[in-house]
Amino acid sequence: MDKGHSLEYDAPIKMKVCFVGDFAVGKTSVAERFVHNRFRSAYVPTIGTQILKKQFTLGHPSRKGTIQIDMVIWDIMGQKGFRELLNEAYFHGTRAVLAVCDVTREETLDNLTYWIDAVYNVTGPIPVRILGNKWDLKNQLEMDEADITAMAEKYDTGYSLTSARTGKDVETAFYALAEKYIIEKFATGKDHQTEEFAVTSTGQSRGKSLAD
Ligand SMILES: Nc1nc2c(ncn2[C@@H]2O[C@H](COP(=O)(O)OP(=O)(O)OP(=O)(O)O)[C@@H](O)[C@H]2O)c(=O)[nH]1
Ligand SMILES: [Mg+2]
């Protein structure tokens, strides 16, 4: 076996994930449920960007054992006036996207097209997962699962019906997205973009530009 090759792939995989979606769909709530296992019922709009980090392990895609994922999660504000300001600075280096809608507000699903295309304009096609969040509010649904499936099919991807309140399917959504990314990464043998962020041993993030 090529030793250098295997060592390279035994290193933790650094991965920047961006949340997108309209205001109040639950981006911050899903991120905080995943990273801190907590939920806040009061709505506190995100101003600008909040960056969270989480390390976890997944089954290795090409051999026995596991591989460590160092995930950097960009949770951005969804307010309408802010959308036009989202650009290269936010989405550059993004490896995968969580596109969140609120199942009690129909327009938030339609708007995912806008959000995903905004990321793709910067990154090109990358793994995306659609989240139909607030699934605990079953009696207030303004869409059904078939509508979410249709959006997922449009982007040839998977979806999860999540609840940040109860925690339903939150972890599995992140794991499925990371798995999709590493399977594609290992299949092609390289990233298509330069590294944007690296998580240091102290957990701090620092800007970094490395040629692949
Ligand atoms: N019932 C229920 N409420 C939720 C859920 N997720 C979020 N919420 C509530 O919805 C509101 C908005 O949640 P946030 O996480 O702040 O939404 P956001 O998408 O980050 O909003 P912006 O930062 O403004 O873009 C808050 O009051 C949350 O408590 C959920 O799964 N179920
Ligand atoms: Mg927020």
Image (cartoon, rainbow, N blue to C red):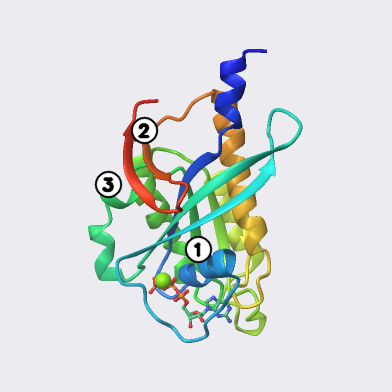
What is the x, y in percent for residue 149? 62, 56
In the image as oriented, which residue stretches furthest toward the bottom?
Answer: 42
Classify mark 1: helix, strand or loop: strand
Q: Does 106 sit left or right of 195 as displayed?
A: right
Q: How crowded is mark 2: few (under 14 residues within 10 Å), some or many (20 or more)?
A: few
Above or below — where is 5 with respect to 185?
above
Quarter of the C terminus within the rendering: top left
In the picture, measured across the screen, residue 26 lies left or right of residue 63, that is left
Q: Name the residue under label 1.
A: 100
Q: Is residue 62 visible?
A: yes
For badge 3, the amino acid type reads Glu
For the point 59% across and 73% down, which residue is it?
Answer: 164
Q: In this view, does 197 lie to the left or right of 142?
A: left
Nearer the observer, 170 or 22: 170
Residue sitting nearer the eye, 3 or 184: 3
Sequence-wise first label, 2 or 3? 3
Amino acid at pointer 1: Val
- The kind of residue tagged 2 is Thr
Report which residue position mark 3 lands on: 88
